[in-house]
Image: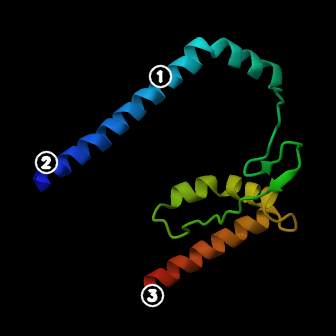
Amino acid sequence: MNKRNELLARVYIVMMFFVFLSFWIIAKVFYVNIIEGDKWRSKIANNVKWKVMEGDRGNIYSADGNILAASSPLFDVRMDLLSPTDDNFNKNIDSLSYYLAKYTRPDKSAWQWRAELKKNRKEGKSKRKKE
């Protein structure tokens, strides 16, 4: 027997082993799912306990409800005060100032935010023209 035939025989043996193994796995899955399926489903139905747990975004809880890991997302909010249109800025500056005062710093009023935004916009435009 030459080397080529010997190598092919080994490859065929290994291939037949994997084909047999795959057929055995498929048969076992079929047997467990179809023939023994009702038995296993009844065992699962007796042991499953459903519990609704409300979780915060990013938190991971253990089975008894304790927090395993917590994360609180932080965001940087940035705004381009040098945008070319004044009408959009002037139209929405009051509501922007109101919400900045409400959600960021309680020690700063909406009018202070408005004045600061207008001042920064004016300074930004003058700096931009100089460049």
Q: State the residue position of label 1.
A: 27
| Amino acid type at image mark 3 | Lys
How far separated are the C-alphas under marks 3 and 1? 79 Å
* Separation of marks 2 and 1 at Cα, in angstroms: 32 Å
Disc 3, SS:
helix
Q: Earlier in the sequence, mark 2 or mark 3?
A: 2
Earlier residue among tags 2 and 1: 2
> Is mark 2 in CB contact (under 8 Å) with mark 1?
no
Q: Quadrant of residue 22?
A: top left
Q: Is residue 15 above or below residue 100?
A: above
Q: Would you say 117 lies left or right of 105 here?
A: left
- Residue 105 placement (x, y as % from top left): 82, 65
Looking at the image, is 47 positioned above or below residue 13?
above
| Left/right of residue 7 with respect to residue 20 in the rendered view | left
Count residues near mark 2 (Cα–Cα under 10 Å), then give few for <14, some for 14-19, many for 20+. few
Between disc 3 and disc 1, the foreground one is: 1
Mark 2 to mark 3 CA distance (whole Å)? 84 Å
Q: Give the residue number, with chain letter if any, for mark 3.
A: 130
Image check: 105 left or right of 36? right
Secondary structure beneath dot 2 equals: helix
Q: Residue at x 45, y 87 (%)?
A: 130
Query: Where does the image place residue 41, in percent across and percent down from the top left?
Result: 70, 17
Judging by the rendered image, the residue that carries numbered circle 2 is 5
Q: Residue at x 84, y 42 (%)?
A: 63
Of the residues shown, which amino acid type is indicated by label 1? Ala
Q: Could you tell which of marks 3 and 1 lies nearer the N-terminus?
A: 1
User: For the residue carrying disc 3, how many other residues have a C-alpha within 10 Å: few (<14), some (14-19), or many (20+)?
Assistant: few
Amino acid type of the residue that numbered disc 2 sits on in the rendered structure: Asn
Q: Label 1, secondary structure: give it.
A: helix
Q: Quadrant of the C terminus?
A: bottom left
Residue located at (57% from left, 59% from top): 89
Out of 131 and 79, give the one closest to the viewer. 79
